[in-house]
Amino acid sequence: MKGLLLKDWYILCSKFKILLFLMLLFAAVPNGPMISFAVIYGAMFPASIMTCDERSKWDKLARTMPYRPIDSTLTKYILGYAFMCLPALLSTLSTMLIGPLTGQSIALSDYLLTKLIPSLIGGFVVLALSMPLQIRLGVEKGQMLVMILTIVIMLLIFYALSSERLNVVFTPSLLLLLGIIVVVLNIFSVFLSIHFYKTKED
């Protein structure tokens, strides 16, 4: 699995440098006005790597190597989770350290409740839904559906984050409930993706 992660990391660094830079740039802005963009970008990286894999016929080559379907699938999820958590951590540090220096201080609890956690929930939903679609439908159909799905989720996040009833909408109990739902959704997504990958191999 380590070799697969290194392969995916090399693809990201060689083909998606601009997206990586934009993701980190958006995350570095204090108070997280662009954190949703950064997290969604991170969630989309596995789909982008799968597109490169399919176009380079990587799946056919992988069948000649001692890689199991679960390894090939889990590496994409691990990468997606890592690149969602990276901008989240950077944005939190920027908000707490740079925000007060620029007169944009915000309480950590307010930042987590109103910006970071809703963005992460949206990112985890994008990853959980896009992975099975991409594996099952392939690059062309899957990528189109993933893009539509991502746009819809981003619009929903922006609407929620800009709502005047923000503090009422994102209560801790509601976020906890959404978090549990997202965890269950991702677990189901992993098993579904592994099943689709095995079917694709057959």
Image (spheres, helix red, strand yellow):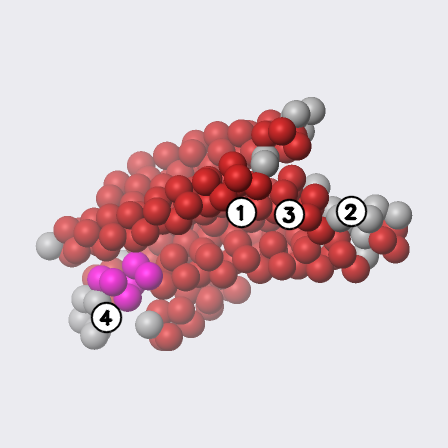
The residue under label 4 is 67
Q: Is residue 72 magenta?
A: yes
Give the mark nearer the N terminus: 1 vs 2.
2
Element at badge 4?
A: loop
For the residues labelled 1 and 4, the Cα–Cα distance comes to 30 Å
Q: Quadrant of the C terminus?
A: bottom left
The disc at residue 112 is 3
Q: Residues within 10 Å of mark 3 (few under 14, many from 20)?
A: some
Q: Which residues are magenta?
A: 69-74
The residue under label 1 is 120
Give the mark nearer the N terminus: 3 vs 1.
3
Residue 7: give x, y in percent of width and height: 40, 69
User: Which residue appears at 57% of the width and 41% of the height?
Assistant: 172
For the residues labelled 4 and 2, the Cα–Cα distance comes to 47 Å
Task: Say if 134 sits above or below 202 in the image.
Answer: above
Element at badge 3?
A: helix
For the residues labelled 1 and 2, the Cα–Cα distance comes to 19 Å
Please state if 139 lies on the left or on the right of 46 as rendered. Answer: left
Give the mark nearer the N terminus: 3 vs 2.
2
User: Which residue appears at 55% of the width and 29% of the height?
Assistant: 155
The answer to whether marks 1 and 2 mark residues whose Cβ atoms lie closer than 8 Å is no
Q: Residues within 10 Å of mark 4 (few under 14, many from 20)?
A: few
Q: Amino acid at mark 4?
A: Tyr
The residue under label 2 is 106
Give the mark nearer the N terminus: 1 vs 4.
4
Give the mark nearer the N terminus: 4 vs 3.
4
For the residues labelled 3 and 2, the Cα–Cα distance comes to 10 Å
Element at badge 1?
A: helix
* Outermost front residue: 173
Q: Residues within 10 Å of mark 1 (few under 14, many from 20)?
A: many
